[in-house]
Amino acid sequence: MSFKQPFEVSMKKFRECVEAIEEEPLRIKMMTGYLLAARNCEMVTKVSEKEILNHSSRNYGIFMDFKFQDYVVQPTDPTGIALGLKQSFSQKVMVIHVATAKRGKRVRKETDAANITEVKPEEVEKALTTYRQFEALKKWRAGELTIDPLLVKVLNGDIYLRYVALPCSLQYEPWIRDLLGWVQKHPQEKLSIPITRRTFWYLYRKALKDILPPKHEHGKDSLKNPLRHLRVSHLLQYYGLTPYEINAYTGWSLSGIFAQLGQVISSNLELYSHLSWRMYLPKLCVPINRFIG
């Protein structure tokens, strides 16, 4: 039995490849997808009617948003002590809220356990409107389309967010200038991408053809979301994030993390997930020239 190794690309080579993309919209898409360690569906604002009705994908990008916060650490704080700070450290941070996709097995498990046979018309209206399925809504109103009641309940359920923090300093993250410039010109998008995940897949496969391996050489997971794969690899290799910090970055639940360790924690801890970026932010505040200079 043979095992395929995940593909690797150095940070320097990857960034040079992306920065060489002449078309600004495409270049920004590559930068954003990478920095957010995003799955394709978490980036896009459009989804085909077939995909959403079959419960195979959603356009999670419609929920993306961001805000700016000040990150301050004092030498006497636990983090300051761990970092060996001699004076206070302050950094402006861009915190992006990303609606995160549930894993397929988890969705199927919930689907198998549910026994929902009907929903109210207003629930269908809300579900299809929220996910911008206006053509499907028109067909449903005309009696031309039947909507699975379970799907309606799922679409109207809770939206799970993860929080990705990027230091607003060019010495730490030079691509932050590109992202900020883009959102100033396109405030309505908020870094999301107004295309489908399949279109996005074709775009980055073409744009990054010189560094991505042929489709048949690696497992589907590493090639389905290669920008996410590369970002996680670089966070581990260059910045030294721990698995716990990677989980905070990528959006896996705290309860899920501890469950893998054989421990049970209160679900109330999930309420503080919006603060989880504080655990890894200091590790991102490293001059990038150390890695690509």
Image: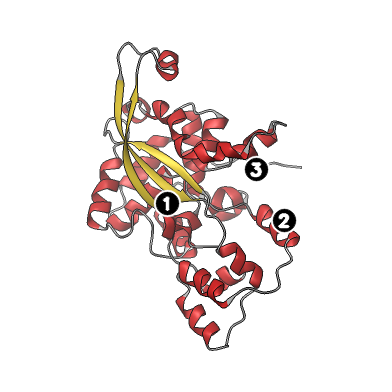
Q: Could you give the CA–CA distance between mark 2 and mark 1, rounded to whole angstroms?
A: 35 Å
Going by the numbered disc 2, the residue's amino acid type is Lys
| Observer able to see residue 201 | yes
Q: Which residue is mark 2?
A: 109
Q: Residues within 10 Å of mark 3 (few under 14, many from 20)?
A: few
Q: Residue drawn 27% across and 30% down?
A: 171
Could you tell me if the residues under marks 3 and 2 are in contact, i.e. CB atoms within 8 Å?
no
Count of marks placed on residues: 3
Q: Is residue 286 left or right of residue 49?
A: left
Going by the numbered disc 1, the residue's amino acid type is Leu
Q: Is residue 170 above or below residue 57?
A: above
Going by the numbered disc 3, the residue's amino acid type is Lys
Q: Is residue 86 above or below residue 68?
A: above
Earlier-in-chain disc, 2 versus 1: 2
- Report x, y in % for residue 198: 49, 64
**Which of the 4 quarters of the picture holds residue 75?**
top left
Q: Which residue is mark 1?
A: 208
Q: Residue drawn 27% across and 52% down?
A: 183
Q: Quadrant of the N terminus?
A: top right
Q: Is residue 267 left or right of residue 32?
A: right
| Residue 41 vs residue 228, the one in the foreground | 41
Q: Which mark is residue 4?
A: 3
Q: Secondary structure at mark 2?
A: helix
Earlier-in-chain disc, 1 versus 3: 3
Q: Residue drawn 38% across and 64% down?
A: 194
- Report x, y in % for residue 41: 50, 58
| Residue 235 vs residue 1, the one in the foreground | 235
Q: Secondary structure at mark 3?
A: loop
